[in-house]
Image (spheres, rainbow, N blue to C red):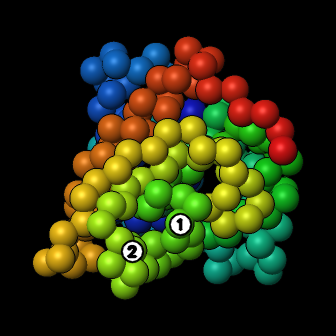
Amino acid sequence: LKLGIMASGTGSNFVAIADAIAQHHLAAHIQVVIYNNPDAPVAQRAQERQIPTHLINHRHFSTREVFDQQIVDRLREADVDWVVMVGWMRRVTQVLIDAFPDRMINIHPSLLPSFPGIRAIEQALEHQVKISGCTVHIVRLEVDSGPILIQAAVPVYPEDTPASLHRRIQIQEHRIIVQAIAQLIQNRLTPCRQ
Ligand code: GRF
């Protein structure tokens, strides 16, 4: 499976995927890592592993559509089959969806459909939920929506801070993002169009 990764930040999920491939747990290849933030640590983590990276800075584009078209062009150039968003902090447009229909997955740090959007962890704490977790889903236009592929739950403790809850969730993220890709490879995840 030829993967394109899209990431904006730290890249710990990228590392989990890259390590699983390096250890032959996943029969996949990362063709390219697209990142939008010049300071994103994910870029260095990819370069250290000799994985090609492309910075596409959204600030240099007039519209979301033109930005997404540039991403599509890069992903196509890199001959990507599936797109994996791991902490991609931009809303996607129809341009990207149409280029990879049902061929993009995203990981989100909540049990969707609870708490979509960028404040998922803070909102879970504000609501005093007792269980949270993470979700891998097929990407649709609406933020953090689309058919759910895999979820994992974690307990939420009264003394949790956003950082402590995020750490607990990320341990599960690293597991289920690899599991989701493994299932794509085995073709066991066949989302139907909605
Ligand atoms: C993850 O928690 C993901 O769910 C969220 O952004 C974070 C990215 O983490 N959307 P990392 O960059 O993979 O470490």
Please state, as top left, top right, bottom left or bottom right, where the N terminus lies in the image: top right
Q: Is 12 placed left or right of 148 in the picture?
A: left
Residue 74, x across and y down, in percent: 69, 47
Q: Amino acid at mark 1?
A: Ser
Ligand 1: image quarter: bottom left
| Quarter of the figure with residue 64 | bottom right
Circle 1 packing at 10 Å, graded few (<14), some (14-19), many (20+), is few
Residue 11, x across and y down, in percent: 37, 54
The residue depicted at 57 percent of the width and 38 percent of the height is 149
Residue 10 shows up from this direction: yes
The residue depicted at 62 percent of the width and 26 percent of the height is 189
Residue 102, x across and y down, in percent: 75, 39
Q: Earlier in the sequence, mark 1 or mark 2?
A: 1
Residue 177: assigned label: none
Q: Is 115 placed left or right of 80 in the picture?
A: left
Q: Is 162 placed left or right of 185 in the picture?
A: left
The residue depicted at 58 percent of the width and 25 percent of the height is 184
Residue extending furthest left?
Answer: 159
Residue linked to disc 1? 114
Q: CA distance from mark 1 to mark 2?
A: 8 Å
Please state, as top left, top right, bottom left or bottom right, where the C terminus lies in the image: top right
**Does the numbered disc 1 mark a residue whose Cβ is under 8 Å from ligand 1?**
no
Q: Is 181 placed left or right of 154 in the picture?
A: right
Q: In the displayed structure, would residue 175 be above or below residue 118?
A: above
The residue depicted at 56 percent of the width and 15 percent of the height is 186
Q: Amino acid at mark 2?
A: Ala
Q: In the displayed structure, would residue 156 be above or below residue 60?
A: above
Residue linked to disc 2? 124
